[in-house]
Amino acid sequence: MSNRVAIVGTFSSRYEREKRGQHITELVYETVSGLMKKLGMEMSQVDNIVSCSQDFLDGRTISNRTIPEAEGAFLKSEAKLAGDGSQAVFYGMIRILSGKYQNCLVLAHAKMSEGSQNVIANAMFDPIFQRALGLDEIIAAALQARAYMTRYHVSPEQTAAAAAKALTSAAKNKNVFRGKKITAKQVLASKMLASPIHELEAFVPADGACALMLASEEQALKWTKNPVWIAGAGAAIEQYYLGDRELSSARVLKEAAKRAYQMAGIKHPEKEIDLVELSNYFSFQELMYPEALGLCAPGKGAALLASGKTMADGKIPVNPSGGVLGGNPLCVSGLARVIEAANQIRGEAGSIQVKKPVKTALAQGSYGPAGQSQCLLVLAADQKIGLTKKSPARKKGKK
Amino acid sequence: MARKAAIIATGQTFHKSKRRDVNIVELIHEAVKACLEDAQMGPKDIDAVLIGNMEHFEGVYNPDLWAVDATGALFKHALKVTTGGTTGASVAHAGYYHVASGLFDCVLCIGWEKQSDGDTTAGLIFQSDPLFERSNMAGAIGTFALAASEYMNKFGISEEQAAKVAVKNRGNAMNNPHAHLRRPVTVQDVLTSPPLAHPIKLLDMCPTSDGACAIIVASEEIAKKKSPNKPAWFKALATRHDQPFNSDLPLLINMRTLQSAAKEAYKQAGITNPRKQFDVAEFYEPCTFAELSWYEALGFCELGGGGKLIDSGVTEMTGELPVNPSGGVISTNCIGATAMIRVAEAALQVMGKAGARQVGGVKTALATGFGGSFWTEVTILEGN
């Protein structure tokens, strides 16, 4: 029985616009066997598996039925979490904490090139009132961006600066495909997708997979010398109808963060967090999410970015990887954030390793229109931080 | 941190082939409301909401997002777990893991399907590999036809013996107000019902239903102090997945996932003689032949003895070990909910709340889930 769970190893495939040469099973096999090799672990030593994928993205009913051989699920307990990869880490952690398992393979995969993203995203909207309007993720995000920018007087130049930072950072990340050295001006010159979101401010469909291994505190040191501990985790969901929501702030992420911080014992995130990997499907989210995470005051996300504090050499680097804008598939992107943050803590981020020592990092994942569902993980090098037994997920006022 | 966890409440909709009176979200709410009423709780008492269905059956991507208002998940921890037919059990097991982890005290688990909004067989076929399997061994009926032929041939099982499963389960469904098909059938009815794919006939196969099921999994403290119902404790659970191609599987000859899961769960729960130690069982039997095969995999009889076991009457309501007092999947099948209904029905039996379908003196109950490429989830529940 374990009171804590650690990430003991990570592996990412190369993310590409289209992996025409690989079947989904081959992609998953490359990723899982890559992780196993890195860990020196046999499949028979894996207790259980949580995979993350989406039937709609894969065009496959029961998308995890495509991959049992490739992920090593033969006569094993496997569960598919159909949401974001960050949630799969949370669920894997829960499964270990239950005492039934000592470790858990967590993986996420998608080949978005095989489908038409806006048609798929449109199927997320209610078939009677919304679908016929042609809503998709980009339009939902545009409504949110507009609400946020109007409320806090954020200019298109400021969101474009966030995109320029992300794409320029991504140019150093060998695992993604969309990075290039670019200025805010060039971002604004790209095609308008849905005002105020330009082409270079929005995620693009991608193919790829990644995986990590979770282990109990009893087992963690068996697999690695430098485990990364999950000190806190929080998830939350908000209203479905965009019109029911207060779109100008990510209240739902604030709720998730409150739980994760409480579990990790974090009181002043702006001082205690060394690095953040967040899911910037759209440029404005790199301004809005740090506000919800308590890294700056509401409406001050653009000023935080302009101050240089969130640059790779800044005080709190945000997305030295470039984040989702660099090119990650949906549902894989949250797990990719967790892996990037863990790699930074382990000093294994290679070409994008930040100079400052990283002891505590945040990884955020989301899915749904305008980030309806959010998950935040607090990762720490120090085993003693966080994961207090009193659950933050429990009701308020309960002892 | 491992803690005990129990099912303290259940809720089911009234199942039909077409619930035209409700949309997806309203259907889900019906089960959630019934479950919360059963627990005498409100949404504020719930820490987390876990949900699952098969999205291609309705054509709604991420319907968990749409369902937020119906489930009471607003600003709560909410996850969607989907594993095919086993979904309902996977969600129930996730409920157990959440509570056992010590991070959550009271978890609402929901499984649902509104098949009348789409085409289930079309959705099912999309699970098969597009190059090698989709054109020749996809969908439930063809796969079970092959599996049943093999099974009959290997063990000398007759169509009459399979028909007896339908007679038993459809008869039991008469006692279950929530069952979808509530009309008794005879062996003759089954044998003369329209053939679907030899040897499967219409009355050998499960129906397609609209419906939802919810359960609440709670910590020991809540289960003992706050629950109005007698708790049904999770005693053991086990999951097994198998290879993706049906042609690689032993199918009904020897369902290795169920055997392997039962072995683990029995060990956990200290079950050495399942026929004596279980008081009742709820199977996910997608077709009549499957129930016979799974008697064997679960150790209720020897390999190949499923036909004789149904002949002996052991699994009848009046027998030593009643199987599917609810009427089973042959009577009600709303896929994402189906495996959870098995767990909920087993819990109702342990709680002593199963009404006209109650088996006397139930202490230990078994529930199985089925899905994917012959995947399985086994759950053992126990009373105080």
Image (cartoon, rainbow, N blue to C red):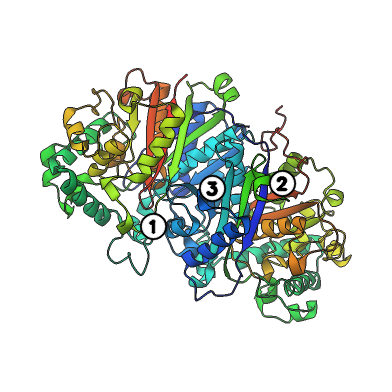
Quote the CA–CA distance across marks 3 and 1.
Answer: 22 Å
**Earlier-in-chain disc, 3 versus 2:** 3
Percent across and percent down for residue B64 are: 53, 50
Which residue position holds label 1? Answer: B244
- Which sits in the foreground, B350 or A385? A385
Would you name the residue on which mark 3 appears?
A45
Mark 1 element type:
loop
Query: Disc 3: which chain?
Result: A
The amino acid type found where label 2 is placed reads Trp
C-alpha span from label 3 to label 2: 20 Å
Instruction: Say whether residue B12 is visible.
Output: no
Residue drawn at the location 21% of the way across and 45% of the way down: B204
Q: Rate crowding at label 1 as few (under 14), some (14 to 19) or many (20 or more) other CA atoms within 10 Å.
A: many
- Which residue in the structure is indicated by mark 2? A229
Which residue is at 47% across, 69% downward?
Answer: A23
Q: Residue at x 60, y 64 (%)?
A: A137
Separation of marks 1 and 2 at Cα, in angstroms: 34 Å
Vertical placement of residue B367 versus A258, above or below: above
The answer to whether residue B143 of the structure is visible from this angle is yes
Which mark is on residue B217?
A: none
Element type where label 3 sits in the image: helix
Label 2 marks which chain's residue?
A
Q: Residues within 10 Å of mark 3 (few under 14, many from 20)?
A: few
Apparent side of residue A84 relative to residue A289 in the rendered image (left or right): left
State the image coordinates of residue B159 (x, y, percent, origin top left).
14, 44
